[in-house]
Each structure stands twice: as C-alpha cells, then as structure tokens.
Amino acid sequence: MSDKRVYLYDCTLRDGAQTQGVDFSAADKTAIAQELDKLGIDYVEGGWPGANPTDDAFFGDPPRLHQARLSAFGMTRRPGRSVENDPGLQAVMNVDAPIACLVGKAWDFHVEVALGIGLDENVEMIGQSLGHAAGRKQEAMFDAEHFFDGYKDNPAFALRCLTTAYEAGARWVVLCDTNGGTLPHEVEEIVAEVARHIPGERLGIHCHDDTGNAVANSLAAVRAGARQVQGALNGLGERCGNANLVSVLPSLILKMGFDTGVSAGQLTQLTHVSRRFDERLNRPPSRGAPYVGESAFAHKGGLHVSAVERDPRSYEHIVPDLVGNRRHIVVSDQAGRSNILARFREIGIDLDDADSGVRKLLDEVKAREFDGYAYDGAEASFELLARQALGGVPDYFDCKSFRVIDERRWNARGELITLSEATVKLEASGRPFMSVAEGNGPVNALDAALRKVLTPIYPVLEDVRLVDYKVRILTPQAGTGAITRMMIESADSTREVWNTVGVSANIIDASYNALRDAIVYKLFREGVRDEAAE
C-alpha cells in the first residue's frame, strides 16, 4: 500500500445524527449513504444496530454501495458477558454490513469509574471483542474512546489497549479525541509516538471540534502517520461537531498531495454534495464554509476584482472548479455564467457560450434564485427549467385549477380526525378532466387527485412515490404571509431518486409546483411523448 493513500471514514449517519435538531429517517440514511458512495468515500458508517428502530430499519434493508463499504457501529462486550452472549455485540455481527467498528475504553479513569472494573479486564474485553469481530467480518476496527485524555493520564495503559486490539486482528485502530479538547501540536506528537508501536497504515484519527481544531487535528494526525480519517459531512456531530470531511478531503488531496478513493472528477461534486446535504436537513448552507460556501470564492468590486480577473491566483487558494464551486464577482454580469453552462453540460445540454438563448436562460435562473428557488438540492427542477427554455419538454398536461380543503374534527368516539380533499381540473391527452381525491395531508391529496387522471394516460407514473418533502420559510419577517420553499423528493422502484422545488407565498401552490415538476421529470426521463400530440 502506498504511504500516500489515506482512507476516509464517514460517520454522519451515526455520530452526525447526534447533532441537536437532526433526526434522520431510514430513507434519509439510505440517500445520504448513496451520495457518499458516489463521492468516493471508502467507509460509510450506517449506525448502531439494535440502538433504535431507525438504525434497525436501515440495516434491515441496507443500500447497495459500489465503492464505499458499509460499517456497523457497536461496542466491545460488556463486563461479565462472553462475546457470544452479549446481545449488543451480536447485533453488530448479525447485520448485513462487511465492516464492524467497535468502541472501547482507553482511559483508565473511565474504566475504573464508569465501568467499575479493573484495567486488565478492560483490555481482555477489547482483545476478545476485536478478535471475534475480525473472524466474522471483512474488517474490524477499534475506536479508542477518549484516547488522547487517556494517553495524557496513563500512556502505558492507553497504548496497551491499542496494541491489544491490533494484535487481535483490528484492521484499523482509531485514536479518538472524544471531547475535542486536544490541540494540533499535541495530536501530532502523540500520534507519532503511537506510530512507533502500531504501523501508521493501521492507524486512524477521529476528532471532535470543541476547540475548533478538528480539521487541523485530523491533518496533523495524517502528518504524523495516521492513514484513516473519520469525520462527518459539513462537520455534523454532537456538541460542536466532528471533523468536517468536506474540508478535510480537499485539503488532503489539493494541499498535502495524498491519494484518497475520491477521483478528480468526483471531487468536483463536493460542493453539490455539501449543499444537497444541507437541503436534506432543511437548513441554509453556510455561505462562509471553506471550499464549498457561496462566499468561499466571492470577490467584491474595485481593485480586488480587477486583480482577480487578471490573475485569480492572487486571491484564490485553489481553482474553484476543482471542488465544484464557482468564482463569484459580486458586481459582474458574468458571475455564474460558466458554472451554469457547466451544469447544462452535466445534463447533456451543450450550449455555445455565444448562443443567443444562453443569456435569456441565465437571466431566468438568476431571477428564480432571487425569488427563492434553490437548484443545488433540486436537480430535476433545474433540468426541466433548462430544457423547457430550449423547447425540449412536451406539455404532458395543463392544470387549469385546483382546490384543497382541510377538515379537522372529532368523531363520535371522541377521536381527532384530520383529512384533506383535493379537486383538480386538468387538460391532458387533448381532453378535459376533473378529479377528486382524499389524503392524509394536502400534498398527499393533491398528488392522489393528479395521479387519478394522469396514471391511466401515462402508466409509468404508477411506479412513482413521494419519499419526503420539506418546507423552508424564506421571509420569516412576513409572519404567516411568508414566502415558502417546498422541496419534494420522489423515487421509483429502480431506487432512482429525484428532487424538485416550488416557491410561493401559498404553501399549497409551492407544493403543486414541486409536485408537477416531479411528475413531468419522470415522464420526460422515461421518454414519454405528449399524448395530445400523437
């Protein structure tokens, strides 16, 4: 193995899920795992089997990954149990994941106070658990909890925990800065010392960000010899978060010259992945995020802009395109032009920069984004916008009007009943239609009413299901009259997922706009023709 190869381990779905206000569904976890897989991450930690129903559902139907390998997290056997008779450990062993990552104590203080056992017994638990996992899985990893605190208090014991796991067959021994209190110079010194006992190609680093140094600490550990880095998308995690893999990854490749499983082409998707992840969390992306933020390569007017336009290297530490971001000249009409054209090429629309339709199309995109549309997390709506502007999408149907009624009442048994009813008037296949349907919410009812008309005409829609939708208030100062943005995620039996967006001061209207795009995109992608034009 090359000494320049660093392996990336993403813990977003487990450690990142401990972020305050974050609550992943099993569908969220699957979609995020697939995004990480496409990005080229080596390991994706899916969660802790047996810890909660969501993780059980996720591992009950694990996603198909092509480059990444799925890891199940757990802990070493409990005191007084054998490895075969520990339900928690066996839950990790029994799921369909080729990797097992087991956490254990490496701080003598925690062993004696939290576990209430002797140091020798703790070491025995580590050795037996990792040996058991190494025999059952493709790879076993040991997460040495609070390692740096333990090393500072009792280096001999902390090292003994590591070497025991290594000798028992652990592929990776991961040094955890669990409370995030260690500084970069300490990390580099301690990891270098550990590397004298365990080969660096078997050492990993997992840092929390409580001092704001998680990324720096991770890079310092790599400098000292560690060859696996654990972290989360956008630095998600409990308290102040984990090391941000979105910052670690390009720093390793572009700044330090290390190889990872992420190719140059995959690296250009980094900005997209980061922003799409924030959209899934229903939160605005950080404009000032390193590498991927909207302001990361933004330049204000005056002499600064002139210098940037003459020689971008004067003010930009990398070429923005390398991570899928773009230069933003605030006062320039050309801001975003090349980026939009590149996005057109990604969906198969190759336009000449001098094409007369390009300016109009760019103005339309900018106007819509000013109104609140966000296309980083809604690729299907973006593609439709581009193709419709070029006359490439059939008019499958025309919604003349719709009405949605919500009812909330108590039934005769004293139970609270909520029901939505939608009425739509459509023109499709050259004929007028009216349809009424009920649902457990306004979006569900509207979807059902549309499908009632459209599915008999376009049978491929029978395969489509609404997976998720999120609402964001864009003008909170307007109170109940605020403009809202609706993001809808749809899927079909092929496990293809697409996202659409709608914006309006009326939340039902915003929902319809996103829902219509979801239906039209499915029809267009399947190559369906306009029935009325036949």
Image: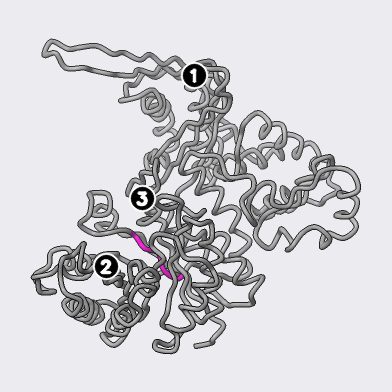
- Disc number lying in front (1 or 3): 3
- C-alpha separation, residue under disc 2 versus residue under disc 3: 24 Å
Earlier-in-chain disc, 2 versus 3 = 3
Residues at discs 2 and 1 in contact (Cβ within 8 Å):
no
Badge 2 crowding class, 10 Å Cα cut-off, few under 14, some 14 to 19, many 20 or more, is some
Tell me if 107 is positioned left or right of 196 in this view: left
Badge 3 crowding class, 10 Å Cα cut-off, few under 14, some 14 to 19, many 20 or more, is some
- Disc number lying in front (2 or 1): 2
Q: In this view, does 102 lie above or below 478?
A: below
Label the magenta part by its dominant secondary structure: strand
Q: Look at label 2 and name its amino acid.
A: Phe
Where does label 2 land, which residue? 109
Badge 1 crowding class, 10 Å Cα cut-off, few under 14, some 14 to 19, many 20 or more, is some
Q: Is residue 164 above or below residue 329?
A: below
**Residue 18 numbered mark, or none:** 3
- C-alpha separation, residue under disc 2 versus residue under disc 1: 75 Å
Q: Residue at x 56, y 78 (%)?
A: 223
Residue 71 position in % (x across, y down): 33, 67
In magenta, the rendered stretch is: 42-46
Q: Residue at x 54, y 15 (%)?
A: 481
Tell me if 335 is positioned left or right of 485 in this view: right
